Amino acid sequence: MGIEGKVALITGAGQGIGRAIALRLASDGADIAIVDVNGDKAEAVADEVRSRGSKAISIVADVTARDQVRAAVDQADEELGSFDIIVNNAGIAQVNPIADVTPDEVSRILAVNVEGVLWGIQVAAAKFKALGHGGKIINASSIAGHEGFAMLGVYSATKFAVRALTQAAAKEFASDGITVNAYCPGVVGTDMWVTIDERFAELTGAPRGATFEKFVGGIALGRAQTPDDVAAFVSYLAGPDSDYMTGQAGLIDGGLVFR
Ligand code: NAD
């Protein structure tokens, strides 16, 4: 028994890791609500899910706005007939040395990476309780949630914060049958890393691609991570095999940060 017939909502699922999670949970048997600020991309992923035989809807929502997250969860329940799993995946990167970070940058990344996850947790837990059943809350942290990386100091702080919210929420909602866990990817070849690599190039003079290769060079398993590598772990966190696990932020990074 897996997650057949369950409904999963994934934020930031218009591309990258979120897209891979949507496709994986669909192949595990769930129906999927794809949430993104980019409606065209979200709908394209919904089409991919439908072409594989699962139900899917796309929803435009900005995770920084609690009302929009709540409306997305309500829509998933109304149109897909249930709501059982939320993956708070949406996030942004920011590369800047601590000496140069500006207040606007900090506000923006806190809003998306921390508040976005907080609203997702809050709204999902309230909905699970209203529906009279438990559920799974799964949050995007990072290797940068276990170690602060140079030039990624504020990003790292947001991902540490996701671990804090994951632990506190796990304790607060355990008695409601709700588990809360996080996944901590390493170096995944998505658009986010293209941006990170370009920004490192600007700041350090490193050639394009060199920063990505340098990080990948530190991975014990010897290759960059794929979105599917992350999605496989999220599949475990979404399914019944992880029912006895809560409050954890598991590293899935090919052997890069060891804790
Ligand atoms: P990505 O940039 O490729 O995709 C992010 C998606 O989120 C996009 O579709 C974007 O439109 C959407 N999004 C951004 N802001 C949003 C908002 N306010 N509301 C709704 N949607 C929004 O990123 P990715 O590499 O797929 O990363 C996904 C998650 O995994 C992020 O939380 C990221 O921090 C985390 N992560 C990524 C890596 C990596 O190496 N790529 C490593 C560790 C953790």
Image (cartoon, rainbow, N blue to C red):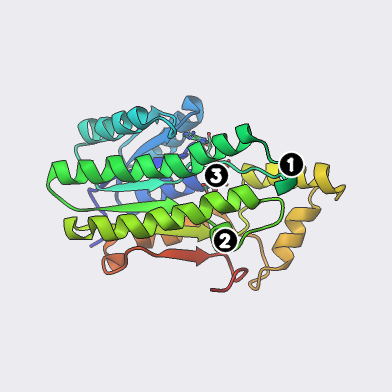
Q: Residue at x 51, y 56 (%)?
A: 160
| Rendering coords of residue 252 (x, y %) | 52, 64
Residue under the image location 66 percent in, 51 percent down: 152
Q: Earlier in the sequence, mark 1 or mark 2?
A: 1
Question: x and y percent of residue 218 in the render?
Answer: 71, 68
Q: Is residue 141 visible?
A: no
Q: Is mark 2 within 8 Å of ligand 1?
A: yes
- Pointers 2 and 3 in contact (CB under 8 A)? no
Sequence-earlier tag: 1 or 3: 3
Quarter the N terminus occupies: bottom left
Q: Nearer the observer, disc 1 or disc 2?
A: 1
Query: Is residue 139 shown left or right of residue 156?
Result: left
Task: List the single residue furthest toward the left.
Answer: 132
Q: Which residue is mark 1?
A: 100
Name the one closer to the observer, 185 or 24: 185
**Residue that mark 3 sits on:** 16
Q: Residue 207 shows which numbered tag?
A: none
Q: Amino acid at mark 3?
A: Gly
Q: Is mark 3 within 8 Å of ligand 1?
A: yes
Name above or below for residue 239 compared with residue 12. Answer: below
Dividing the image into four equal quarters, which quarter contains ligand 1?
A: top right
Task: Indicate which label's residue lies in the foreground, 1 or 3.
Answer: 1
Residue 255 position within the rendered picture, expressed as x and y whole percent measured from the top left: 60, 71
N-terminal of the two: label 2 or label 3?
3
Dot 2 corresponds to which residue?
Answer: 143
Mark 3 Cα-neighbour bin, 10 Å: few <14, some 14–19, many ≥20: some
Q: Nearer the viewer, mark 2 or mark 3?
A: 2
Residue located 76% across and 61% down the image:
214
> Is residue 3 in sight in this rendering?
yes
- Report the amino acid beneath label 1: Asp
- Which residue is more in the foreground, 139 or 173? 173
Left or right of residue 161: residue 109: right
